[in-house]
Amino acid sequence: MSPSLSAVPESDLDLQDVPDLPESAGTAAATDSHAISHADSEAPAPAPASGDAKPLVARWYAVQVASSCEKKVKATLEQRAVTLGVDSRILEIEIPQTPGVKLKKDGSRQSIEEKVFPGYVLVRMVLDEDTMMAVRSTPNVINFVGAEDRRATGKARGHIKPRPLSRSEVDRIFKRAAEKKPVVKVDLAEGDQIVVTAGPFKDFQGEVIEVSGERSKLKALLSIFGRETPVELEFSQISKQS
């Protein structure tokens, strides 16, 4: 899905600016990579004290947060929900993640958790004034994802109206998070200079011309017998030159 978004003023947030998230997306909250019961995305929240009151429906919302602050927002919002007395209406805060492998410059591999939507958290909550304020006032939260409620007069832009994620959107997001195939992230790019550390071309130097993270391979131009020749190499066979 998608690159991490930098923090922007609330007035500048527009649903059209959000990549990889559906247009009908709404409020959010933070999350870990553990499995969640997203099948209950529209399940009723705990019934209110009055036996005659209708059960409140909790829905999933997407929330944009400052870059790399997803876990911090999750932890803070969980604490604030209890402190503000809305923990019975803010039910789950999730950061969908999938396993990943980062290939370092020296060829070593590091297991990581790759965020499905960097810069966003998902929150299952009952939307009302109190829960909206609890989310919006949490440090490092930019705003809910939703539709802009434009003002009738003046040039000033309106506030974002949170819109819930549909059941199909929730299923798609968490299905992707549940995928076990690791995402490979490579600290290499076209134009980087490398030296071969293993194999028949050991000690040859060259320039990267193509990177294939899915196959854990790259192509580099190596000077062989005075001619630059494209050679396919395993990530484990090379080291990036500084």
Image (tube, rainbow, N blue to C red):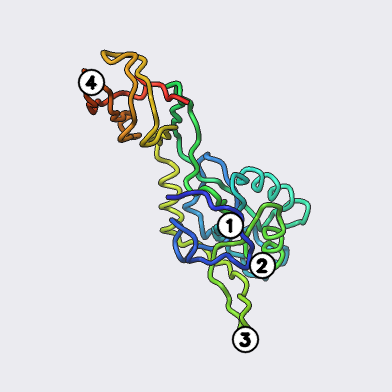
- Identify the residue at horizontal 50%, vertical 43% (top origin): 115
Query: Which image quadrant is residue 7 in?
Result: bottom right
Q: Where in the figure is residue 61, as x and y percent of width and height?
A: 55, 59
The image shows residue 148, relative to residue 227, as above or below, that is below
Circle 2 Cα neighbour tier, 10 Å, few/some/many (<14 / 14–19 / ≥20): few
As helix, strand or loop, the secondary structure at mark 4 comes to loop
Q: Amino acid at mark 4?
A: Gly
Q: Using the image, determine if residue 240 lies above or below residue 130.
A: above
Give the mark nearer the N terminus: 2 vs 4: 2
- Looking at the image, is mark 3 or mark 1 nearer the viewer? 3
Name the residue beneath numbered marker 1.
63
The foreground one among 55 and 111 is 111
Residue 183 lies left or right of residue 29; in this view the side is left
Residue 160 pos. (x, y %): 59, 69
Q: Observer-nearest residue: 50 or 191?
A: 191
At horizontal 63% and vertical 53% (from top left) the residue drawn is 91
Q: Which mark is residue 226?
A: 4
